[in-house]
Amino acid sequence: MTKDDCKKLVLDIIADIAPDEDLSNVKPDVRLRDQLQLDSMDFLDIVMELRKRNGIEVPEADYGHLASLDSCADYLTPKFNALAAKG
Amino acid sequence: MNLSRIVITGVGLAAPNGNSLPEFRRHLLNGVAGVEVIEVRYMGPQPAGVCHFDPLKYQKKKELRVGTRAGSISIYCAREAMADSGADFSARPTDRVGIYIGCTEHGNVETENEIYAISKFKYDTRFWSHYHNPRTVANNPAGEVSLHMGITGPAYTIGAACAAGNLGLIHAAQMLRLGEVDLAICGGVSESIHTFGIFAGFKSQGALASHADPKKASRPFDKARNGIVVSEGGCLYTLERLDDALTRGAKIYAEIAGYCVNSDASDYVLPNPTRQAECVRRAIAHAGLTPGGIHIVNTHATATPQGDIQECEAIRAVFGEGCPDTSINNTKSFIGHCMGAAGALELAGNLPSFDDGVVHPTINVDNLDPQCALPGLVLNHPKKVGRVDTILNNSFGMLGINSTLIVKRFVP
């Protein structure tokens, strides 16, 4: 998985949990909360959907890595690739 | 004690056969039932009353995703009632508005859904939603209205089984009289069709309706009635003290005339006609009326074989062999049993009688049970009675809670 693939996957999750938001111009280097109406429960939704859809676990101490699309991709892409390598 | 007069100034409703009072009333007069067949988890097809209002009329998609069906119904009804009332909400201190919503139960739907969801993950509770607690707290429906409308006054639910719709109104009237709030949004809601547990519970009790034609499934007083049609719905009113309503030139639907709430203290589920009759009598006395002064009795009858007979026994005990000006009807024959919303919705369906002088009927009575043959029962077709000044609304519930609410034509 590339970082761009990862960003798209995260955006797909956000599209489901924030269905009223326009996601066409989300800036990858800006905090998601600064450009979208997302609250702390929504971030828990992102964590839950990663767990449900992809089997990815994000420990509470790492929630800060989900701040922007870029930080999501930096943090999650190795996790996805490690999971894929395990088969 | 000189109590303030309390009046109804707005109505918002979601019924299985109508999304507004005019539509609901039209269907009640035209014999249009709102029961259909739905697929119930683990149970298969069942007759049920389903509401078809557009939740996106007022809510955002995210609110629908996070909130509950009961919350959504409540928000729709509250917004409709406020719009109908004409009260200028922006100019009103929001801490002087109270939200009092009757519920039969709350949380079954959300809990069942979560258990079903984690069953797909081998019951691993890591997959249990973080929304479970805010969705299942008992005040959820009222809290969602408060959040949605920015109302900072008291907002809570009143758990009163199937008497809850009446209780919402009664409690609101009491709070207005105490001066706790200046405007109340009150009534009842139900999301019960989304929980298999309620269907299965009634089935196990031998009290779940069945019929080849879902629109005929709810048939109180018919000899072949075989139980309850579970329905969702909601009806919220705006209530105000009369002086406030007159000051702002509000349209007044009716005045709260009297009420009573009591308890059977005799059984978990079986009704008690003696206590029901006591409740009706006390409400009539509270209104300063006599049985002969009641023009419409809207029955609670749910179409269970025994329950209908027992309510009829209670009504006979109060009204004797009939009062010439008293008509008796039932709304569940159209919409099934809307549980916590039942009392509030059923009252609403009768309010237009003050204007049109017509009593809506009890439909689906092909063969009247002689034990339910009350004098004044309006069967299958509406009855033009000329003038209606008083409506008595019965709503009873499990664990023996009884409620009777009487409203009267507003006369300055």
Image (cartoon, coloured by chain):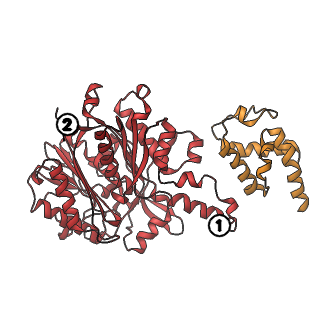
Chain colours: A orange, B red
The residue indicated by pointer 2 is B410
Chain for numbered disc 1? B
The residue indicated by pointer 1 is B119
Most foreground residue, A85 or B157: B157
Is residue B314 visible to the viewer in this orientation of the structure? yes
Q: Are marks 2 and 1 in contact (CB under 8 Å)?
A: no
Most foreground residue, B104 or A2: B104
Q: Position of residue B264 (x, y in %)?
A: 27, 66
Question: Quadrant location of the C terminus of chain B?
Answer: top left
Occupied quadrant, residue B174: top left
Q: Amino acid at mark 2?
A: Phe
Q: Label 1 crowding class (10 Å Cα cut-off): few <14, some 14-19, many 20+?
A: few
Q: Residue furthest front?
A: B1
Q: Amino acid at mark 1?
A: Ser
Question: Quadrant location of the N terminus of chain B?
Answer: top left
A17 over B82 or under it: above or below: below
